Image (spheres, coloured by chain):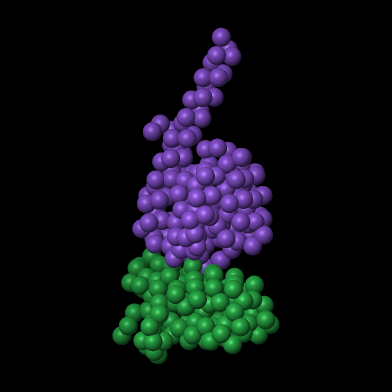
Chain colours: A green, B purple
């Protein structure tokens, strides 16, 4: 993971140019706010098991939907929650993952 | 291969609905076999569905709450040895993959899923399922022929 990955550029799916799958990638982007809320809710409740599960799902789905940049951050979050690291460390990793999630956009770069 | 299924039954199991939606679309749009695809997010329901029979190919996530992919694999194989099972995992730990292969998994797919890899593995898995089916049918016919003599 590089610092440049955490900059504020929009992240586009590599499926966005696939005529069969571009709509699915857009739906994934539309539903990203719900995924962020679920991650934040699990952390706020101290529910590391759910946080780990949600991060695990994000790790598998983000790259599958063409948002490869999210995968290592979701994996780091899953590991952090699974290993029950100190809350401030989990929080840092969570914030990094969410920052990436907020940058996903539908379509292709203009 | 004689008498191939026109619409082989493919059961997809993943507790993440996003993955099911994507995999169903990829298989429906691009697979060169016209699978009859059924998808389930609840592995407990999936086990019940497998026990009912008729599943030709099972594609399942390995790590799920409640019932994991390895248990579904064992259930599918005990129900019908011809059923082929493709496991998906985000963890590439050697132990879990070896356990899956030792229990009869046809192959495995690492997440994030690559569409082309999925389609190629499905083709291979389907051909393997057809060979198994023909072999079991041959064994059954041979047994009945000898009993009739």
* Residue lying at the far left of the rendered structure: A110
Q: Which residue is drawn at 61% across and 40% down?
A: B78
Residue B124 quadrant: top left
Viewer-side residue, A38 vs A94: A94
Q: Residue furthest bottom?
A: A8
Can you give x and y, in whole percent of width and height, for residue A2 in the image?
38, 83
Residue at the image point whose x is 54% and y is 73% from the top: A79
Left or right of residue A88: residue A15? left
Q: Where is residue A24 in the image (x, y as percent from the top left)?
A: 45, 70
Look at the image and tell me in which quarter the C terminus of chain B lies: top right
Rendered view: A74 above or below B20: below
Left or right, B36 with respect to A49, comes to: left
Q: In this view, does A27 lie above or below A41?
A: above
Q: In the image, residue B131 lies at what x, y percent?
A: 43, 35
Q: Is residue B27 above or below residue A59?
A: above
**Residue at (39, 62) in percent of width and height:** B114
Q: Can residue B28 be seen in this view?
A: no
In the rendered structure, the answer to whether residue A110 lies left or right of residue B74 reads left
- Which residue appears at 47% of the width and 46% of the height? B106
Q: Quadrant of residue B118?
A: bottom left
Above or below for A6 versus B46? below
């Amino acid at each position: 993971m590089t610092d440049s990955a955490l900059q504020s550029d929009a992240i586009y799916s590599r499926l966005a140019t696939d005529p069969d799958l571009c709509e699915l990638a857009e739906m994934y982007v539309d539903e990203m706010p719900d995924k962020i809320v679920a991650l934040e809710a699990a952390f706020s409740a101290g529910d590391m098991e759910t946080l780990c599960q949600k991060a695990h799902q994000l790790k598998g789905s983000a790259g599958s939907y063409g948002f490869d940049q999210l995968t290592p951050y979701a994996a780091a979050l899953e590991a952090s929650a699974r290993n029950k690291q100190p809350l401030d460390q989990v929080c840092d990793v969570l914030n990094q993952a969410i920052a990436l999630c907020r940058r996903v956009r539908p379509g292709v770069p203009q | 291969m004689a008498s191939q299924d026109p619409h082989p039954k493919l059961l997809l199991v993943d507790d993440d609905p996003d993955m099911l939606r994507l995999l169903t679309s990829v298989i429906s749009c691009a697979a060169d076999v016209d699978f009859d695809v059924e998808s389930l997010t609840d592995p407990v329901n999936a086990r019940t569905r497998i026990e009912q029979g008729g599943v030709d190919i099972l594609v399942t996530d390995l790590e799920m709450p409640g019932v994991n992919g390895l248990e579904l694999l064992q259930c599918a194989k005990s129900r019908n040895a011809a059923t082929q099972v493709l496991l998906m995992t985000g963890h590439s730990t050697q132990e879990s993959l070896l356990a899956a292969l030792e229990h009869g998994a046809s192959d495995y797919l690492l997440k994030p899923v690559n569409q082309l890899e999925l389609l190629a593995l499905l083709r291979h898995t389907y051909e393997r399922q057809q060979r198994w089916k023909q072999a079991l049918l041959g064994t059954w016919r041979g047994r009945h022929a000898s009993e009739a003599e």
